[in-house]
Every structure is written in structure tokens, then in C-alpha cells.
Amino acid sequence: MKLGGELVGDPDIEIRRLATLESAVPGDLSFLSDKRYRAKLRTTRASAVILARAERDATDLPRILCEDPYAYYARAARLLNPEARPAPGVHPRAVVENGAQVPASATVGPGCYIGRGAQLAERVVVGANCSIGEDERIGEGSRLYPSVTVYPGFIIGKRAVIHAGVVIGADGFGMAAEAGRWIKIPQTGGVNIGDDVEIGANTTIDRGALDDTVIEDGVKLDNQIQIGHNVRVGAHTAMAGCVAVAGSTRIGSHCAIGGAARIIGHLTIADHVTIFAAAVVTKSIARAGTYAGTLPSAPSREWAKTVAHLRSLDRVVERIRDLETRLPKPGKKKR
Amino acid sequence: MKLGGELVGDPDIEIRRLATLESAVPGDLSFLSDKRYRAKLRTTRASAVILARAERDATDLPRILCEDPYAYYARAARLLNPEARPAPGVHPRAVVENGAQVPASATVGPGCYIGRGAQLAERVVVGANCSIGEDERIGEGSRLYPSVTVYPGFIIGKRAVIHAGVVIGADGFGMAAEAGRWIKIPQTGGVNIGDDVEIGANTTIDRGALDDTVIEDGVKLDNQIQIGHNVRVGAHTAMAGCVAVAGSTRIGSHCAIGGAARIIGHLTIADHVTIFAAAVVTKSIARAGTYAGTLPSAPSREWAKTVAHLRSLDRVVERIRDLETRLPKPGKKKR
Amino acid sequence: MKLGGELVGDPDIEIRRLATLESAVPGDLSFLSDKRYRAKLRTTRASAVILARAERDATDLPRILCEDPYAYYARAARLLNPEARPAPGVHPRAVVENGAQVPASATVGPGCYIGRGAQLAERVVVGANCSIGEDERIGEGSRLYPSVTVYPGFIIGKRAVIHAGVVIGADGFGMAAEAGRWIKIPQTGGVNIGDDVEIGANTTIDRGALDDTVIEDGVKLDNQIQIGHNVRVGAHTAMAGCVAVAGSTRIGSHCAIGGAARIIGHLTIADHVTIFAAAVVTKSIARAGTYAGTLPSAPSREWAKTVAHLRSLDRVVERIRDLETRLPKPGKKKR
């Protein structure tokens, strides 16, 4: 009960692990975070459950009552699953250039390359086959999984979790057109990543063109996200998988961006904005709220009709106008 | 004629390779899989062609008649292009931890890391610079191309083909919000990949939160697909490139998911469902069939009009209602 | 003034670097590429600015007048930021197979694998942990950043810039259905990449099925783009991040494809076509011009209404037809 909450039932019950209501076996602690699944309380084999206070009588099982069962579950899961970190040390098959700082508490895996002047802080873990550019600074306790590439000269804060295949600091897409060809604009800006940031597998974050690309504290990015150059993502904003943010867009703090949402460049999104999955954001958003933009799919025959109608909307509006002309409004011609 | 079919014409013709009707030269075998390209039979330089039985008289070339020319071509291509596999053995620049099992028939490329307790079965090939986590099990004959990362403790079946840059088993995106911050939920579920699965370049498959993420037998995933935690993909389902499937969604067997389709979380998709390219699936699909959801692009001026109309649909409906009020239905007021 | 243009003001001013109007400090050269930002000229601390000729009087600062300030800025940036290339040589921790050609002017980073018969031309740079397949040919001056995978047997032209995590030449997604299973079709075509091509981080380009996938000279691809098998991308076409092009589509020269646009397979797109961000192209485009297809997102309540209306368009059209029946056109029944 280190985590607070009110225990109802046998206080001596022993919990070994967490499990969903369906897959729990005796010895497991489960949780109900959504009333819709309340029926599962009847059939679960869990030894105890985490419930909202209002659900006190929803089961006879030993139960922990709290304000927010999902957050409680998160904390319990962290307690029951302390992170396993590899032993410190530089693997003999790693390459650490002269002038790189790797404290004794850090771990550098086989096949890693740590460039000259790079500074790993205490307890940093760099997984196998990562490439860390020159003069890179990585904050205390951060962890990189295998095959992460960080280009030279950037800053990653403390306690970062960076999953496999992530690329940080590749050139932004800056091209000027001249006489039918593209002139590449050297990308000389940086990448600045705050503390407590998580970055999912194969996500890419480009360096700025002149100024920096900035990921503020507590940002959580899922897999395969693309962050263009000079983007700023505000503190504690979370983005689900496959989001794309084009260059120079500024996203506020505490936003939640749904999976596969796309945000075009040079926009400003306010704090506390929620964007639904797969929406395309084409204009700045000045106020907090929820925004959507996805057409749900349908059986293909039905969809074909919708598309046909949509394409003929011009004609539909014309027909209405025509009807209106022939049927004049009685009396008040206000509009 | 090992592959069946009926040969019409010279049985002694010698075939060296397969080619498209356009690019074939003498010595090549070609195929017609779509009637629309029938005219190309007249100009092809191929020495022989694979045709549907109904096309028997479409050419004078030596020809193989069969039920399904495309499947026949697939089989012929496999026969003429047996897979070249690298010689077995562990490269001296690979790191194989104590307690990892690597049979003599397996190949481990340079720069690979094979964690403690990992088990490679017979004839497994691991390309250069792959990272295979502890206690991972990889089934007989599976092949990993370079720079694949597999997190510790999962199961990959037999005869898998896993292309470069794939990441299997990174943490799912599980975060609980508390007081404006995100608490990371330890992801402790597994990844379970069946037999005969192919996974395209840079695709990512997350581990489950508590239960497993499951890819059943015969699933084929193209490049840059994102599979969220606890997703289940049913046997023999194929997904084209850039599909995203959010967490906890269950996709049936024998489905075909078009490129860049997006499927939101916690849905159930039936067996034998076809989803067209770029559709967004926002609700469960209970029955087999084809589903669509994409608006085809148009010249930008035309498109701008469509968008404007779409946004004023509310007003359009109002105008119709208004007209209806002013023009009451004669007689039967059924509605 | 090596770059041309007309200097107005102090010719002895010394420029150290380029900066945006906002972040410039004394010693910096800035530029105005969009009139909308003209107000920033008043507050910038830049020592000089690049302007269009028409903006001659927009500031009193020393200024360079030219036709195209953005292109001028690009050239100035290249002049002030000459590319830093690593020292030539093969790192002792690289593996270069017998029969691979690596000239003395080339750089091969630690952890690289260069397959038998591969040919690197003069001044090629291969970053850490790359895997270059057998018989691969890479043209003069090309640069690969870390963890790039190139499958065996392909051709990359001169002066390519290939960012981290790129995968070139993985199998195209070719499967024939037979009795409810997928038969993999061996992918035996090549990849042919012209000169002066840039490829962004984690982009994937598949090899052809029978013929080649072709990227012509001067093509610029941003991050996380997927190019399917047998696609041809015409010279000097640029694609922003997350574009997906399905198999066998041919894209013309000098096209500009907006971020996250999706182009389905087997299409032909003309030269000089611009496609807006996030559009889905479902039909061939025969003439130059701009094409769009994105629905801008909206506050979610408003959006829900739009979707509802869209779904009931069938009924809307019916109601109009009904009104038209009841209100016959006076006189001329042309339609």
C-alpha cells in the first residue's frame, strides 16, 4: 500500500504481478479502468483488483480503491517491474574515441561508436550498434536501445528513453529551387531534447536549419514519428505512432496528438490541444480543445457513393439555388 | 513443367529467366496476369509466356496454360531463383554471449550481437549489425537482414524473412496521465511471431503491455508498418507499406490491408476483410467484405471548392429544410 | 559578393554566419524570403540582410539585393558552411571483404560491412555501422550516414547524401495468393539511383520485382518515405517526409510532392506536378499543375456534424430530387 488508496478485504494477500482481468491467475493484481469492462470482474481469477472509489461494491474480491485506477496501475507496475539495466562498462567491441567522456557507471554496448568529445553522464546506457556523434551530450540515466543514430553536437536531457532505430539530428529538408534544380541548404541548427523524454522505435527528429529543433521536458513520442526541422514540441505533449510534424511548426505543452495525425509546417498549436487520430492539421490552432478531421471508412460500395456525391456538391448547391429562385420566400426577404 | 499447366508449342524451348512482357528478351519466360495488357503479347520478345486457359489463342508463342498465371509466375520465379544464403558460421566480428545457442548451420554476420540465452534454430541467418536480445528464440530457417533489432525474450517462428531496420519488441506506448505528466507504464508483455511471416524494412512491432502482441502464421507485412502493443494479426493476412495499427486491435485471418491504411485501437476486424489503401478504420468490422475511406485528390482549385461545400453542408441541409417547409408534400404525409 | 547580387550599404561589413531575422546577432547575415515577415526587418539585429530587389527600401541595413533571396541564402549558406568530411581511411573495426574496392580517398567507419565485389568510388564516406551488400557500386563523393543498409548488387550515383537508417533494395512486396496463402515472388530486379540524390533518415526504397526501381538524377527525398518496387521517380523531383509511393508508379520530373502524400500503385504522374501535403493520389495525372486532396481538421464537434452530413448525402440528394419533382421547371425543360 506504498502507493496509497484504500484496501478493502484481506490485507495479507500476496501479489506477484499485474495482469488484465481476462488473463489474470491467482497471485495477480488486476484493474478496472473503464466501466464498460465491469462484467469482467465477475469472471476474473485475479487475487485483487484496483478500482475507482465508486466501484467499491462491484466485486467481493480484495480491492484497492483510488481516484484513478489507471494511474494507480501504472505506479504499481513500476513498483513490481523495476527496470533491469545492463551492467556498467564499455564493451570491448565498442569504439570510444579519444576525448569522449564515459563515466564508470555508464554502459556502452558492443558495436557502438562514441565520437570525439561526446559526453555521457552517469548511468547512461547505450545499446548495441548505436552511433553517437562528436560532442554529443547525453544526460544522466538516459537509455538508448540498439541501432540509434545521433548526429554530432546535440543535447539529450536526463532519463531519456530512446528506442531502437531512432535517428536524431539528420539534416532537415531544406532545398531552394533554382533553374529547375534543388540547391541543398546546409542544416546548421541543433537538436535540443529536454529531460524525461521518450522516443519510440524508428522515429526521426531532424536538426534545425539555422535555429534548433526543440523537444521539451516530458514529451513522449511513439514509433515512426517524423519531426521536421525547427519544430518545437512543448513540455509533456504526447504523440502516438506515425505522427508527422512538418518544419517550423510549434506545438504547445500538454497536447495529445493521435496516431498518424499530420501537421503541416509553420503552424502554431496552442497548449492543451487534443488532435484525433489521422487528422490533418492545416491551420494554426489558437485555443485548447479537441480537433478532428478523419472520414471513417465504410463498405466500399457505400463509400463510392459518398465520393460521387461529394464530387457533385457543386451541382447540388446549384440545384438548391435554382429551387430557391423558383420558390421565393414569402414576405421578409431579409437574407 | 514441374509446376503443372499445359504446354502449347515447342516443348524443348530453354528458359533462363523470367521477365515482364516489355523487357523480355529471347530466352525469357513472361506472363500475362491482366487482360488489359494483352496487346503486349504482340510485341514481346519473350520465348514463351504463361497464360490463363482462356487466353490459349491470344498468341502463337510457346505458352503454358494454367488457372492462375500470376501464381504460376510466382512458383516459376521461385524455381528459377533459388534463394542464395550466406555460408554458415559465426563471423569473428560478431559477439555471441555465453549461453546463446547458435547451431553450426546458422550464419551470424559481422557486428551482430546475440544476447545470453538466445536460441537460434538450424539454418537461421542473422545479417550484419543485428542486435538479438537475451532469451530470444528464432525458428528454423529464419532470415534477418542487416540492422534488425529484436528486444529480449520473444519468439519468432520458422522461415521468417525480416528485412533491414525492423524493430521487434520495443515498448508499447503506454502512459497514464497524472497531474499533467505522463507516467510510463512498464511494458512487460511479449511478442509472438508465427511461422512463415515476412516483415518489411523499418517496420516496428511493439511488445505487449501485459499480454502479448501476436503475429500469426503466414502474415506478410510490407515496409514501415507500425503494429502497436497487444495487436493480434490473424493468419495469412497481408498488409502493404505504411499501414499503422494502434494498440489492442485484433485483425482477422486472410485480410488484405492496403498501403497506408490506418486502424485505430481496440477494434476487432473480421476474417477476409479487404481495406483499401489509405482508408482510416475507426470502428470494428464484423463481416467480410471490402471497405474504403479515401477521398481521391483533384486539381487544387476544384478541391478547394469541394472543401468549401463540405464545410457548408450544415447550411445546405438547412436550405433544403426551408424549401421543404415552404413546399409541403401533397397528400400522404408518410414521413 | 562571390554570389552576385547588388550590395547596398557598407561594403566592408564582416559576416560570420547566417541566421534567421529573429535570432540574428551582430555579425550575422539574414534574409527575407517572404514578404509576410517584412516587419521583422525593423527589429532584427542582423548586420546585413538578403532581399528581393523590390525590397530595396524596406530597411536601412546593409543589404544584398537579388532575384531570389531564398536561393541566394542557400548559396551563401553553402559558402559559409563547407561540409566537414571525416578523414579518409578504413576504420580497423570495419569489415571489408576480399574483392571490395575502397580507394584511399574513401572513408569507411567503424562497424561497417562492405561485401565482396562492392566498389566505392573516390571520396565516398560510409558512416558507422552501415552494411553494403556484395557488388554494390557507390559513385564518387557520395556520403552514407550511420546504419544505412544497401542490399547487394545495386547502383548509387555520384554525390548522393543518404541519411541514417535508410534501407535500399529490400524485397518489394510481391505475393501471389493461392489457396488462401501467400506465395512470395522472388524479387530479382535492381535499384538504380542517379547522381545528386538525397535520401532522408529511415526512408526505404525497394528493389524491383523483375525490372529496376529507378531514382533519377537530382531527386530529393525527405525522411521516412516509402518507395515501392519498380517505381520510377523522375529527375529533380522532391518529396517531403512520409510520402508513400506504391509499386510500379512512375512519377515525372520536377515534381514536388507534399509531406505524407500517398500515391497508389501503377499510376503515371506527369512532369511538373505539385501534390499538396497529405493528399491521396488514386488516378494517373496527365498534366502539370497542383493537386490537393486533404480535408482540414476542425473542432471535433463541428467535424462530427460534417461527417454526419457527408454520410447522409444520399438522402440530401433525394430530398432535392423530391423538391424538384414537386416544383416543375417553368417552361424550358432543357435538362
Image: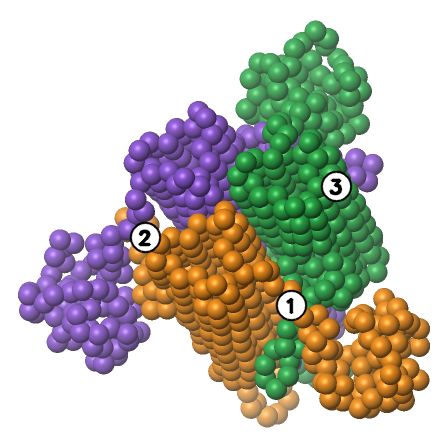
Chain colours: A green, B purple, C orange
- Pick the residue in front: B278 or B48: B48
Is tag 2's residue or tag 1's residue first in the polypeptide sequence?
1
Query: In this rendering, do the residues under marks 3 and 2 share a single chain?
Result: no
Q: Residues within 10 Å of mark 2 (few under 14, many from 20)?
A: some
Q: Position of residue B156 (x, y in %)?
A: 42, 36
Query: Which residue is the site of mark 2?
Result: C184
Query: Which residue is the site of mark 1?
Result: C83
Q: Residue at x 80, y 20 (%)?
A: A4
To which quarter of the image does residue B140 belong? top left
Task: Say which mark, if any, is on residue A112.
Answer: none
Quarter of the image with the C terminus of chain A in it: bottom right
Helix, strand or loop at mark 3: loop
Q: Position of residue C185 (x, y in %)?
A: 31, 56
Q: Amino acid at mark 1?
A: Glu
Q: CA distance from mark 1 to mark 3?
A: 28 Å
To which quarter of the image does residue A33 belong? top right
Badge nearest the viewer, 3 or 2:
3
